[in-house]
Structures are given as structure tokens and as C-alpha cells.
Amino acid sequence: MAIKTIKSAFDHYDRQYGKKGVKPDKKRLDKLFMALYILGDKGKKSVIRQDIERKCSISKNEIMLAIEELTEKNYIIDESTMSGMKWRLNRNGISYAEDLIDDLESNISPVYIPDPD
């Protein structure tokens, strides 16, 4: 797996889908899928909201909008407690995240040459 960190996942996502006219709502959902998958040890563990905010630079509002949509679509399990909000992916969510990351990895060029500024 070439994508091991959330930063590299987001960078690859932005390079691949940034110019394709992907709707902001889909970008938000996809990035939350990747965050929950990577930060949650491939979807095995729950991830607290503060970690998503801090490590992924996603605002609380964007997280909550995406969580609401992912809950409605049955992709996550809410494991929130009195100590805080946390979620993990269910089987459907893990499958989607793996497909998304596989798609990103299949389009990674062997040598990445950054665009000139």
C-alpha cells in the first residue's frame, strides 16, 4: 500500500479528483471515509472527532455534516460516549474506503513530479 498516512491520502485525492469537478459534498464524504479508515487502523478502531479535526484539518461542522450523511447511508457505527464523539466504519464503510484508496493507488505514477508554482 503506497498510501499510509492521511496526508498522503488527501494529497493523492486532491491531485486525482481536484480538477474533475467532484462535488464538495462527495469530497467531504470521501475524505471522512479515508480519515476513519486510516486513523482507525483500517477501520478496526473508532476515531474521536478531535483527532479528525486536528490530524485532517476538517472542521467540526464538516465532520458533523458528513457523519450525519454516512449514518443515514449505513456506513459507520456511532461509538460516542459521555467522554466524546467517536465513530468507526462498518463493513460497508471499510469496503468503500478500501475501494477508494485502491483507486487512488492505481493512479499513482511511479515518480511524482510536483507542479511548478
Image (cartoon, rainbow, N blue to C red):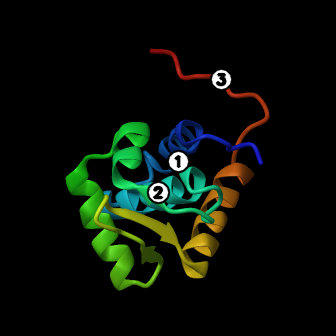
Q: Nearer the viewer, mark 3 or mark 2?
A: 2
Q: Amino acid at mark 2?
A: Val
Q: Position of residue 73 (x, y in %)?
A: 40, 84
Name the residue rendered at 46%, 75% in the picture.
76
- The answer to whether any part of residue 22 appears in the image is no
- The answer to whether any part of residue 67 appears in the image is yes
* Left or right of residue 61: residue 36: right
Q: Secondary structure at mark 2?
A: strand
Label 3 sits on residue: 113
Name the residue rendered at 31%, 59% in the picture.
83
Instruction: Say which label, 1 or 3, has the lower sequence index.
Output: 1
Classify 75 as above or below 15: below
Q: Position of residue 102 (x, y in %)?
A: 70, 59
Label 1 sits on residue: 13
State the residue in front, 10 or 56. Answer: 56
- Contact flag, marks 1 and 3 (Cβ < 8 Å): no
- Contact flag, marks 3 and 2 (Cβ < 8 Å): no
Q: Quadrant of the C terminus?
A: top left
Q: Amino acid at mark 3?
A: Ile
Number of numbered labels in the structure image: 3
Alpha carbon distance from label 1 to label 3:
16 Å
Alpha carbon distance from label 1 to label 2:
21 Å
**Residue located farthest toward the top when viewing the structure as drawn:** 117
